[in-house]
Amino acid sequence: MKVSIITVCYNSAATIRDTIESVFLQDYPNIEYIIVDGASKDNTLDIVNEYQDRIAAVISEPDKGLYDAMNKGIELATGDIVGILNSDDFFTSASSVSTLMAGFNRDDIDAVYSDLVYVQAENTDKITRLYSSKLFKKSLMKFGIMLPHPTFYAKKDVYRKCGLYKLDYRVAADFELIARCIVNGLVINRVPAITVKMREGGISSSGLMWRVHQNMEVVRACKENGIKTNLALVALKLPYKLFTLLTRKFVKV
């Protein structure tokens, strides 16, 4: 199967080379790579253009934010499977995509997901937290617990059936989309591996006010998809995250 990998970026000159090179190191033989840039003002595009002959499509234009850029990439994608690798993230090894694709081992599987690790922005060899998907299940979404979005690889048909990212969400449209898909019967399969490294400091790992806003959006996403929850329940995911921080060296994937 052909895999479309989408990278969205804006003023990402400091990190995007790692992202691009991790894609081109992949041993999976059939990858379409798409980059959607939000009209960066730094030298992001200069770096992207160094790899132009190996990138299927590059868009650089103003957009309505991160999720609008993702939607543009999905609409451009011609692969059977679509995955998103943001410009702060990169694959852990040359076999990351092959490992994820091995999860499509039955015809009824609509999407796969795995684990990722957070790393220090300036020292990406230093792991700060394991984002484990091992315990994820539908019933945990009411606590704001979701599978790792950067490891979510779905059939293109999933987006045709379930729709794209909602642009009236600022930080939790990924949570809402996956919740929407799962509630509507998406068949998902966990791949027990760490496939992505995510730098700390992205939009979903910012300060307190971002966290409050994110929790409010998560509650809204749940309610829009028929999942009963409230802010108090969603706040309970903090102890869960602390647990993953304290046990990152001991929890098996």
Image: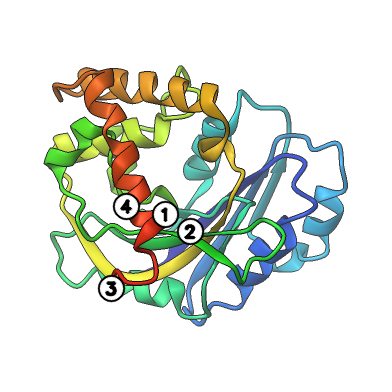
Residue depth check, mark 3 versus mark 2: number of the one nearer the observer: 3
Residue depth check, mark 3 versus mark 1: number of the one nearer the observer: 3
Q: Looking at the image, is mark 4 or mark 3 earlier in the sequence?
A: 4
Q: Which mark is residue 82?
A: 1
Q: Is residue 32 left or right of residue 145?
A: right
Q: Amino acid at mark 1?
A: Val
Q: Evaluate whether residue 25 shows in this view.
A: yes
Q: Which residue is mark 2?
A: 4
Between 165 and 235, the residue placed more toward the observer is 235
Q: In this picture, is 211 found above or below 27?
A: above
Quadrant (top left/top right/bottom left/bottom right) for the C terminus: bottom left
Q: Which residue is mark 3?
A: 252
For the residues labelled 3 and 1, the Cα–Cα distance comes to: 27 Å
Q: What kind of element bears circle 3? A: loop
| Residue in the picture at 72% in, 56% down | 15
Q: Looking at the image, is mark 3 or mark 2 earlier in the sequence?
A: 2
Q: What kind of element bears circle 4? A: helix
Residue depth check, mark 1 versus mark 4: number of the one nearer the observer: 4
Q: Looking at the image, is mark 2 or mark 1 earlier in the sequence?
A: 2
Q: Amino acid at mark 4?
A: Phe
For the residues labelled 1 and 4, the Cα–Cα distance comes to: 31 Å
Q: Which mark is residue 243?
A: 4
